[in-house]
Image: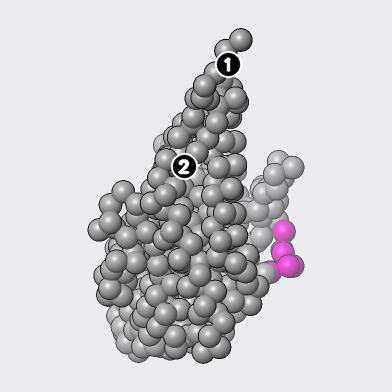
């Protein structure tokens, strides 16, 4: 009886491999890689224990095959009996093995890694097996830096902040004195909600000489959300020394003083006298009337709020549902908690700067309109 001479093969092709991180403390090499398989084209990452270049390379291909097989079988049950292999293994194995051996050698050299050009080279190394011109390892450091910065900005524009931060960290290895890199890393961490890391990055950017207005604003905003109001105030005062007529800084400073129960109307009045439209816009976008970290509330009922504000109850409900008025709600309850002092402050500011009637007309005309979820986020 004759059997099959060969088994159908599921071909995998490695497109690129790139070093993500070399962790000397834990003895780990992190690689990202892009490949195609019967299920499609993917980008993934794995960690290899640093011990023997041959075994590290074998482990890489073993894990790659397992991942590609799993993805392909998920996509198509008919592939369960199909054999898989890497079509360009011969061309890709030696560069990966050499990379692993170089990592082992540089870690065993005993030289300070942050001063070791070979280590810097390895941390920013990579191979593109379909287009040699895209291989990081064939580029000079300047071209690698430009590549990382370009990729990071593109990913940030698409909202992929984790991937962008990885590219920026590599750019930082090549140029550790650039305030721009630290600021961009800070923005990524800010968008990901890593406030402590964002604070560290923005502070480093400022220490390296960054005087840009948005860096001041980012840094003060982080302190605001961490309830470090005095530090936020100090940063905004420094900003106004550099940019004395910046409307955004004035509105932010007024907001900080409001949070600290200090006088703030004089700051808003000055901003309003300089640029009415910009002041109104920034109050609408950024002024937070809810007290940050304020545990004790002077609660008031909806009925009393309507009397205090001289606004119908239904309008207050609409304003609250659109996040246009300081009100707190809970997901497991329909109760709306209103603070008397916050409401009065909100109404006072909105009336003083000619915003209240427009807000009421907007929610009345569009009761199911857009909810403003980020009143204190930079544009």
Instruction: Report x, y in % for residue 111.
Output: 51, 89
Left or right, 245 with respect to 262, comes to left
Q: Residue 47 or 322: which is nearer the viewer? A: 47
Residue 132 coordinates in the image, percent (x, y): 28, 56
Is residue 275 shown to the viewer in this render?
Answer: no
User: Which residue range is magenta in the image?
Assistant: 294-299
Residue denoted by label 2: 86
Q: What element carries label 2?
A: strand
Query: Which comes sooner in the sequence, label 2 or label 1?
Result: 1
The total of numbered circles placed on residues is: 2
User: In screen coordinates, is 290 left or right of 244?
Assistant: right
Give the image location of residue 350, x and y in percent: 45, 61
Rendered residue at 54%/49% (across/down): 61
Q: In this view, does 135 lie above or below 80?
A: below
On-image quarter of the C terminus: bottom left
- Relative depth, front residue between 121 and 374: 121
Instruction: Please name the predominant secondary structure of the magenta segment in the image.
Output: loop
Asked if residue 213 is among those painted magenta in the image, a careful observer would answer no
- Residue at image coords 45%, 66%: 98
Identify which residue, 75 or 237, lies in the foreground: 75
Residue 292, above or below 204: above
What residue is shown with label 1?
A: 3
Q: Taking the image as drawn, is residue 3 in sight?
A: yes
């Amino acid at each position: 009886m004759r059997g099959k001479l060969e088994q159908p093969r599921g071909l995998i092709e490695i497109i690129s491999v790139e070093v993500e991180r070399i962790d000397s403390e834990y003895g780990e090499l992190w690689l990202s890689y892009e490949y195609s398989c019967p299920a499609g084209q993917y980008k993934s990452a794995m960690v290899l224990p640093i011990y023997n270049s041959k075994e590290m390379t074998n482990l890489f291909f073993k894990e790659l095959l397992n991942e590609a097989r799993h993805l392909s079988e998920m996509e198509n049950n008919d592939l369960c009996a199909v054999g898989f292999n890497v079509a360009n293994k011969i061309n890709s194995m030696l560069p990966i093995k050499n990379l692993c051996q170089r990592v082992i050698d540089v870690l065993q050299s005993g030289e300070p890694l942050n001063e070791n050009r070979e280590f810097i080279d390895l941390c920013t190394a990579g191979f593109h097996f379909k287009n040699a011109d895209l291989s990081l390892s064939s580029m000079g450091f300047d071209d690698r830096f430009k590549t990382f910065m370009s990729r990071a900005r593109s990913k940030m524009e698409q909202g992929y902040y984790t991937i962008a931060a990885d590219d920026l960290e590599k750019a930082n290895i090549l140029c550790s004195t650039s305030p721009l890199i630290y600021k961009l890393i800070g923005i990524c961490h800010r968008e990901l909600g890593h406030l402590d890391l964002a604070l560290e990055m923005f502070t480093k950017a400022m220490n390296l000489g960054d005087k840009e207005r948005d860096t001041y604003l980012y840094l003060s905003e982080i302190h605001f959300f961490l309830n470090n109001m005095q530090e936020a105030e100090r940063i905004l005062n420094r900003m106004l020394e550099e940019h004395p007529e910046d409307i955004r800084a004035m509105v932010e400073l007024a907001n900080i003083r409001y949070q600290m129960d200090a006088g703030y109307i004089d700051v808003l009045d000055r901003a309003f006298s300089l640029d009415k439209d910009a002041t109104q816009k920034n109050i609408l976008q950024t002024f937070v009337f809810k007290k940050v970290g304020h545990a004790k509330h002077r609660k008031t009922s909806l009925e009393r709020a309507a009397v205090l504000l001289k606004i119908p109850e239904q309008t207050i409900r609409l304003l609250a549902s659109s996040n246009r008025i300081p009100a707190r709600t809970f997901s497991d309850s329909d109760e709306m908690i209103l603070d008397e002092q916050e409401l009065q402050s909100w109404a006072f500011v909105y009336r003083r700067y000619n915003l209240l009637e427009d807000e009421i007309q907007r929610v009345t005309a569009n009761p199911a309109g857009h909810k403003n979820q980020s009143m204190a986020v930079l544009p």
